């Protein structure tokens, strides 16, 4: 199955339910619908049109990782940052990082490949997933991310994203 909203009904939390929850909490965002974005390059082709002139945006690439002790991590980094899993593991203070399987991604974050997002912590926090966010987020005006599906993007103010994490009980760790 693909990661678009056409198949969201098979997710533990649908994109529609997530957006309704954000609305219920009064957490603001701008929603954009587009063709499914599967790669950073796909996202770069469309995300500029979502941003206001001069807006400092953090655009993310998201990694679902496991360590040798089978602990799960979601790491959201600036999309152009080079990734070396050994160096990343050292920065996070964990060893033996590898990518989690598609099955574990769905089980632990409630999403499919291509739709990995900090917003998936709505499921991940209940499954004990540890979240790390690029330290550049602290200087961003807005953060662009998928709302659990890859044919939608939300642009959310940094403070709104932090309010979301507070509501669901996520301890944000910066890397």
Image (cartoon, helix red, strand yellow):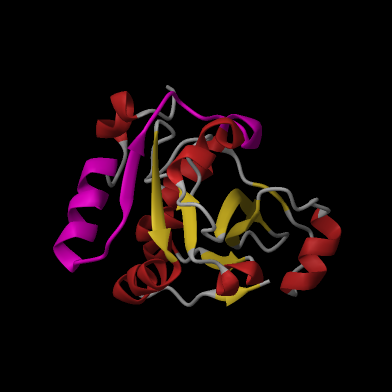
- Residue 44 part of the magenta segment: no
> Measured along the vertical axis of the image, is residue 80 above or below residue 134?
above
Q: At 43% from the left edge and 23% from the top edge, which residue is drawn?
A: 35
Q: How many marks?
A: 0
Looking at the image, residue 26 sits to the left or right of residue 89; the answer is left
| Placement of the N terminus among the 4 image quadrants | top left
Q: Is residue 7 visible?
A: yes
Residue 20 rendering spot, x and y as whole percentages: 18, 52
Q: Residue at x 79, y 51 (%)?
A: 83
Residue at left offset 59%, top offset 51%: 60
Query: Can residue 14 be seen by looking at this rendering?
Result: no
Q: Nearer the viewer, residue 105 or 78?
A: 78
Q: Is residue 37 magenta?
A: yes
View extreme (front): residue: 53
Residue 19 locus on image (x, y percent): 24, 50
**Residue 107 appears left or right of 71:** left
Q: Which residues are magenta?
A: 15-42
Identify the residue at image location x=85%, y=63%.
87
Q: Give the farthest residue toward the left.
A: 24
Image location (x, y in percent) of residue 18:
26, 51
Q: On the rendered structure, is 51 left or right of 12?
A: right
In the picture, which quadrant includes the C terminus?
Answer: bottom right
Q: Nearer the viewer, residue 168 or 144?
A: 144
**Relative depth, front residue between 121 and 137:** 137
Where is residue 141? Give x, y as percent: 49, 66
């Amino acid at each position: 199955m693909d990661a678009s909203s056409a198949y969201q009904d098979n997710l533990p939390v649908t994109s529609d339910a997530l957006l309704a929850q954000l609305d219920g909490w009064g957490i603001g965002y701008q929603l954009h619908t587009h063709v499914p974005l599967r790669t950073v390059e796909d996202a770069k082709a469309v995300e500029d049109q979502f941003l206001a002139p001069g807006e400092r945006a953090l655009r993310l690439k998201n990694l679902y990782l496991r360590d040798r002790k089978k602990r799960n991590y979601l790491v959201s980094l600036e999309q152009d940052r080079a990734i070396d899993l050994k160096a990343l593991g050292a920065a996070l203070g964990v060893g033996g990082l590898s990518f989690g399987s598609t099955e574990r991604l769905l089980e632990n974050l409630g999403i499919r490949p291509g739709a990995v997002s900090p917003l998936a912590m709505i499921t991940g926090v209940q499954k004990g997933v540890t979240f790390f966010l690029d330290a550049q987020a602290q200087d961003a005006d807005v953060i662009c991310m998928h709302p659990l599906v890859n044919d939608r993007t939300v642009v959310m103010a940094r403070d709104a994203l932090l309010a979301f994490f507070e509501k669901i009980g996520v301890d944000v760790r910066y890397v």
